[in-house]
Image (cartoon, helix red, strand yellow):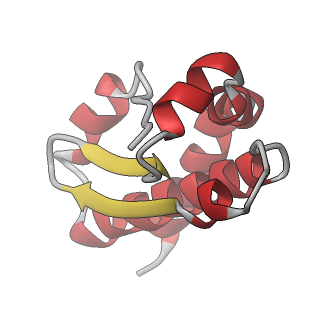
Amino acid sequence: MISFRLKGMEQLEKRLKSMPKRVQDEMGRAMRDEAVAVLAKAQESVPYDTGYLMSTGDVRDVRVNQHRTDIDVGYTAPYAIYVHSRFPWLLRAFQERANGFARRIADRLSKAMEKR
């Protein structure tokens, strides 16, 4: 599986410790939505021969707790890492989606905190 970890989330994750459970849950949903958007963007430029590589794109394993949020986005084809080393389509998709990421997450969490 090819995957990337977003750095710089430490401050947000620290704040999650003091937030209500509904906000923590929203963090998981927001992160999953962002990961799905990264995968959708990656699917637009994944190298295509037989279609197998494209078919193995996946978002899975959203793990949220008071300390951190982890999510896996990638491709499980055995040769994905080799293709990606020559044509980094997933990295480019992630970089394109990174612009505005913090704002989109903050907006979702802010709305979740407003709900009673």
Q: Nearer the viewer, residue 33 or 89?
A: 89
Q: Nearer the viewer, residue 104 or 46?
A: 46
Q: Nearer the viewer, residue 21 or 89?
A: 89
Eyeballing the image, is 62 above or below 98?
A: below
- The number of numbered discs placed on residues in the rendered structure image is 0
22 relative position to 3: left or right = left
Instruction: Tell me which residue sits at (73%, 58%) in the image.
Output: 40
Q: Give the residue at the far front of this rendering.
A: 50
Instruction: Tell me which residue sits at (73%, 60%) in the image.
Output: 50
Instruction: Tell me which residue sits at (44%, 31%) in the image.
Output: 4
Residue 87: percent from left, percent from top = 71, 24
Q: Give the residue at the far bottom of this rendering.
A: 116
Instruction: Tell me which residue sits at (64%, 36%) in the image.
Output: 90
Eyeballing the image, is 106 above or below 63?
A: above
112 relative position to 44: left or right = left
Residue 22: percent from left, percent from top = 32, 72
Q: Nearer the viewer, residue 114 or 99?
A: 99
Say which quadrant the C terminus sits in.
bottom left
Q: Based on the displayed image, in which of its 4 quarters is residue 64 positioned?
A: bottom left
Eyeballing the image, is 52 above or below 38?
A: below
